[in-house]
Amino acid sequence: MKVLFRADEIAERVKTLGSEISSYYRGRDLTVVGILKGSFMFLSDLVRRIDVPVQLEFVRLSSYRNASEPQGTVKISMDIEDDIRGRNVLIVDDILDTGQSMLAFKRHLEEMGVHSVMVCTLLDKTYRRAAPIQPDFYGFRIEDGFVVGYGLDYAEQYRTLPDIYVIDT
Ligand code: IMP
Ligand code: MG
């Protein structure tokens, strides 16, 4: 495994992202929806860098990768229970890869009647994008390659590492 982003570089970037997000939402309500489990570390650092009031929600998604479900559906194994109708929502995730689950989840929130939905991911892996979606805020763009650490896992390992690594495959 090779270090791709050190903890101090991540912290610096997260600080900047926090101020961009704060400027964008200043004077408006903001509900941050974290996608578990991958976003937990990024989200907890990011929300401490946002200086407008934030409400927090968490969801857990699992995609139908090999099932006969139509593309563009997402299984929500833990959904939002509070009423978020009319709210400005910022979805926070670790990485945007194909974008399929994010697009489906974004549509799900729109159907719940939110006022606006934006997407923030720490990493933007553009190479494999298959769905028409881009992050509105992102930390770093990366080439193809599998990354772990700072919340990201490989078979549930490495999530708790403070730096981000790329795995040699
Ligand atoms: P997709 O954008 O629907 O393809 O799926 C994105 C999800 O796949 C992310 O939330 C991660 O959980 C996982 N993922 C994609 N690429 C990586 C990676 O390089 N390392 C760890 N998890 C990844
Ligand atoms: Mg994930």
Image (cartoon, grey):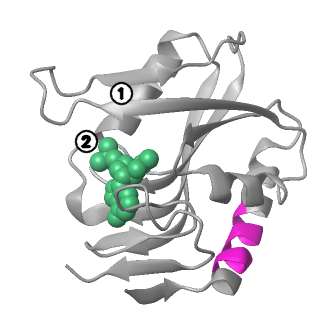
As helix, strand or loop, the secondary structure at mark 1 comes to helix
Q: Residue at x 9, y 21 (%)?
A: 68
- 133 sits to left or right of 60: left
Instruction: Sort mark 2 into few (<14), some (14-19) or many (20+) by Cα contacts within 10 Å.
Output: some
Three-letter amino acid code of the residue under disc 2? Ala
Task: Kindly identify which numbered label has been placed on residue 131.
Answer: 2
Relative to 125, 118 lies left or right: right
- Magenta region, residue range: 10-17
Residue 153 picture location, percent across and down? 43, 60
Dot 2 beta carbon under 8 Å from ligand 1 = yes
> Which residue lies at the image location 28% right of the left edge and 41% below the top edge?
132
Q: Position of residue 154 (x, y in %)?
A: 36, 62
Name the magenta segment's main secondary structure: helix
Nearest the viewer among 16 and 163 is: 163
Quadrant where the C terminus is found in the figure: bottom left
Circle count: 2
Q: Is residue 97 magenta?
A: no
Which residue is tagged 1? 104
Q: Is residue 67 above or below residue 40?
A: above
Image coordinates of residue 5 in percent, x first then y, are: 53, 83
